[in-house]
Amino acid sequence: MDSHDVSYVSPWELKPHELNFQIYQDAPDDEFLESVKSLGILEPLVALPDNTILSGHRRMVAGRLLEMEAVPVMYYTKEVGEDEAIRILILANRQRDKTNEQKAREYRVLKGVESRMAKSRMKSGESVKDEEPKGRARDIAAKAVGFDWRTAEAAVTVVEEIDAALEEGDEERADQLRHKL
């Protein structure tokens, strides 16, 4: 993001990133809505030029639910590829309280992103930039979500079992697995 200019945009013009719900599966709770209602949106959302949100999905939903005319948005002005956008989406959520399931979902996605980005750099002969993390994709992804890689891999296995239980319509089994996680 080269510029820190804040624009005010209708929350209905913004588009959620497709991965956000897959990873976090949450919406603003009553406490969050009450906070936005009384204080407004204190931190701008972050979006790509096409209005796809990278940070601030719950703030966007709150803006819609509270029928706000506009919400503050900062736009990326530099070109951002899909893998970089996914990386930003996950890393922008570092401060939030997350369940182990959400961390496992972040890890699974981020490990793929880091692996693809490393392969792309190798093909092009590009080296890792100083500000980018170095190491194996699994280690970088695990560290970013607050796990070691073995714990992250085990958690992903449980998440895959949760997803299978949900596909079969077995909500009770999915909840048992979530409790285990």
Image (cartoon, rainbow, N blue to C red):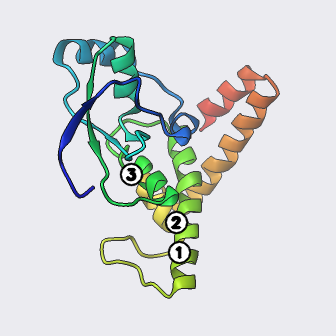
Q: Which mark is residue 51?
A: none
Mark 2 touching mark 3, by CB under 8 A? Answer: no
Q: Check whether the beta carbons of the residues at disc 1 and disc 2 lie within 8 A of each other.
A: yes
The residue singled out by tag 1 in the image is 118
Is residue 19 at all visible to an observer of this figure?
Answer: yes
Q: Quadrant of residue 59?
A: top left
Q: Nearer the viewer, residue 146 or 46?
A: 46
- Badge 3 marks a residue whose secondary structure is helix
Question: Circle 2 sits on which residue?
Answer: 114
Please give the label number shown on residue 91: 3
Report how far apart the C-alphas of labels 2 and 3 lie in the structure.
Answer: 12 Å
For the image, the number of numbered tags is: 3
Within-10-Å neighbours for mark 2: few <14, some 14–19, many 20+? many
Q: Is residue 83 above or below residue 161?
A: below
**Quadrant in the rendering for residue 101:** top right
Amino acid bearing label 2: Glu
